[in-house]
Amino acid sequence: MLTAEQILASQKATIETLFGLTSKAFEGVEKLVELNLTASKAALAEAADTTQAVLGVKDAQELLALQASLFQPLAEKTAAYSRHLYDIASGTGAEFGKAMEAQTAEAQKKLLAVVDNAAKNAPAGSETAVAVFKSAVAAGNNALESVQKAVKQASDVAEANFNAVASQAVNAARTTTSAKKR
């Protein structure tokens, strides 16, 4: 059985974890707000520069050249913004994942301690039932570890795909810009 001290310690650890995760969530939001402010300031400055450039255009040929010169940097900036956004989201998600893994490991350890304690106090002849229960707990732990590994692999594949798509978009913009300049 769990003592009052063990229950209090468990509750305290849970609250500390909750506050830690809340802090990480706010850090993520803070980074997102900072990214959006930076992007907004840059977009406003670029809009002013582009407006000045458009007002200085003398003919259609110069307007087409200006348009072509603006397209590639826009694609690159959009890809960079998306990359920063993804990094913030994945970083915050990784922090949550680490916390959940730690909590799961701690819960597993406590469960095994309770099982061991119960096994010590179990009546004679119940060794088989205790062994079966421990085996089931071990199987559950193995299944959980397999799921965690699969999620990590899926996350890695998703990140690789994101990077490939972003790279292709920037390359396509470069190709289009080069073709328009000719």
Image (cartoon, helix red, strand yellow):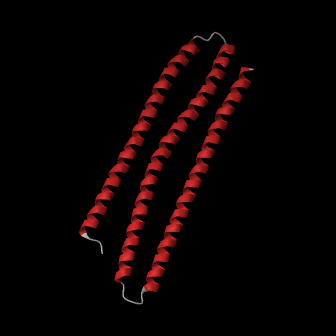
Looking at the picture, does residue 82 appear above or below residue 67? below
Viewer-side residue, 178 vs 93: 93
Q: Is residue 73 above or below residue 147?
A: above
**Marker count (numbered):** 0
Q: Residue furthest left?
A: 4
| Residue at the far bottom in the pictured view | 125
Q: Position of residue 162 (x, y in %)?
A: 60, 43
Q: Work out whether 76 lies above or below 105.
A: above
User: Could you say where residue 180 lies in the image, as x and y percent from the top left?
Assistant: 72, 23
| Residue 174 image offset from top left, x and y in percent | 68, 28
Query: Residue at point 63% right, 27% down?
Result: 72
Quarter of the picture holding the C terminus: top right
| 30 with respect to 165 (left or right) | left
Query: What residue lies at 44% left-to-right and 49% top-to-bottom?
Result: 95
* Residue 151 relative to residue 18: left or right: right
Please tell me which residue is depicted at 30% across the width and 75% down the height of the picture.
1
Of residues 107 and 73, the one nearer the viewer is 107
Q: Residue at x 39, y 65 (%)?
A: 107
Q: Name the side, left or right, on which 137 lies relative to 123.
A: right
